[in-house]
Image (cartoon, rainbow, N blue to C red):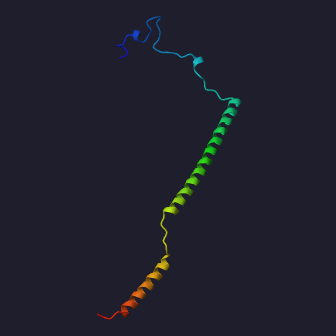
Amino acid sequence: MALSVPLSRFTSRVGGGSAFFVRLLDHIKIMTKPNEKELVLQNKELKKEVSRLQRNNAKSEIQIFSLKREVSQLRKLTTPKPLLSEKKMREIEERVQRQLDQTRRKLPAA
């Protein structure tokens, strides 16, 4: 394909040129090691961010604790409690059964 495309496609119409573009170095940020001042500033910023996140975390923990307490209280309010214990219910049932048995004995046989 390169042979079938005229060179004028890759060159500007005025002044000629090349198919390649070379960027000037003053526009490129060259990666360098940060100096001590930049590191100190970055460290301060990171410490601020950590402090902010810790505060937010503490607030979230308090909110979670509060919500758990509310849920617990709501469960207590909505969970029906038996009026009598299992043992007390058995005692009453046995007493009623004895009274029924005594009443049946007193009735004349049919």
Q: Count every numbered label the image shows and give the total.
A: 0
Question: Residue at the spot x=60%, y=23% of the render?
Answer: 30
Question: Residue at the spot x=66%, y=29% of the render?
Answer: 34
In the image, taking residue 49 as reference, residue 109 lies left or right, namely left
Q: Dividing the image into 4 quarters, which one contains the C terminus?
A: bottom left
Which residue occupies the foreground of this view, 44 or 27?
A: 44
Which residue occupies the foreground of this view, 4 or 91?
A: 91
Which residue occupies the foreground of this view, 104 or 26?
A: 104
Residue 108 % position (x, y): 33, 94
In the image, taking residue 61 as reference, residue 75 lies left or right, namely left
Residue 38 % position (x, y): 68, 30
Reply above or below: 51 against 92: above
Residue 23 % position (x, y): 54, 17
Question: Residue at the spot x=57%, y=57% of the render?
Answer: 69
Reply above or below: 69 against 105: above
- Residue found at the far top of this picture: 15
Question: Residue at the spot x=43%, y=6% of the render?
Answer: 13
- Residue found at the far left of this picture: 110
Residue 48 % position (x, y): 66, 38
Reply above or below: 16 against 84: above
In the image, taking residue 8 as reference, residue 73 lies left or right, namely right
Q: Dividing the image into 4 quarters, which one contains the N terminus?
A: top left
